[in-house]
Image: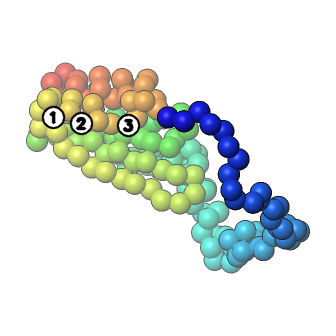
Amino acid sequence: MSTDCRPSAAPPASPIEVSPPFTKRRIDHIDEPARPLGAKRAALQVRRLRASQPVARAAAKKMGIDAGALILESKDNSIAFSLRATAVGLLIERTQRQPVGSRLVQTMVFADPTTFERWCASEPIRFDNPVLYDQLRREGHEALCGKR
């Protein structure tokens, strides 16, 4: 290893000329503000917002749509569970709502407590709303064991 520090034979680098920066950024279509909704779509959006309000859903419950079922809901009404004990096992209907847009409804039947417990262990609501999750587990086990 050499400790000599000799200057290199290459000439010193000259400064590179850089063009001045652009003063205006090109605006893409995605950067523009959203177009207003048409009359039909705006009406549909308003109807969906009204349908997701607790008042409309409370009226549907009073009409007996889910008669004989225990309904557990989150405070913001974004997720609801309907539990019903049947001859086959425990029927759970899980409904997940978005303020505007889609609604996901899943229906499951559990014949024994071990499969119900395995499903509970993978349910994402246990992190978002642990109180609702605990109530769901308690009521589900009661319905499966025939205490209800």
Where 8 falls versus 34 (above or below)? above
User: In the rendered view, does 111 fall on the left or right side of 35?
Assistant: left
Question: Mark 3 and mark 2: span between their CA atoms?
Answer: 10 Å
- The first of marks 1 and 3 along the sequence is 1
On the image, the x and y values in percent for residue 49 come to 61, 56
Give, as a three-letter code, the residue at label 3: Pro
Q: Does residue 68 appear anywhere in the picture?
A: no
Give, as a three-letter code, the residue at label 1: Thr
User: In percent of the image, x 56 and y 44: which residue is there?
Assistant: 54
Rendering quarter of residue 47 = bottom right
Give, as a three-letter code, the residue at label 2: Trp
Question: Mark 1 and mark 3: span between their CA atoms?
Answer: 16 Å
Identify the residue under disc 2. Answer: 119
Rendering quarter of residue 119 = top left
Q: Residues within 10 Å of mark 3 (few under 14, many from 20)?
A: few
Q: Name the disc covering residue 124, or none.
A: 3
Rendering quarter of residue 94 = top left
What secondary structure is found at the residue carrying circle 3?
A: loop
Q: Does residue 117 appear anywhere in the picture?
A: yes
Identify the residue under disc 1. Answer: 115
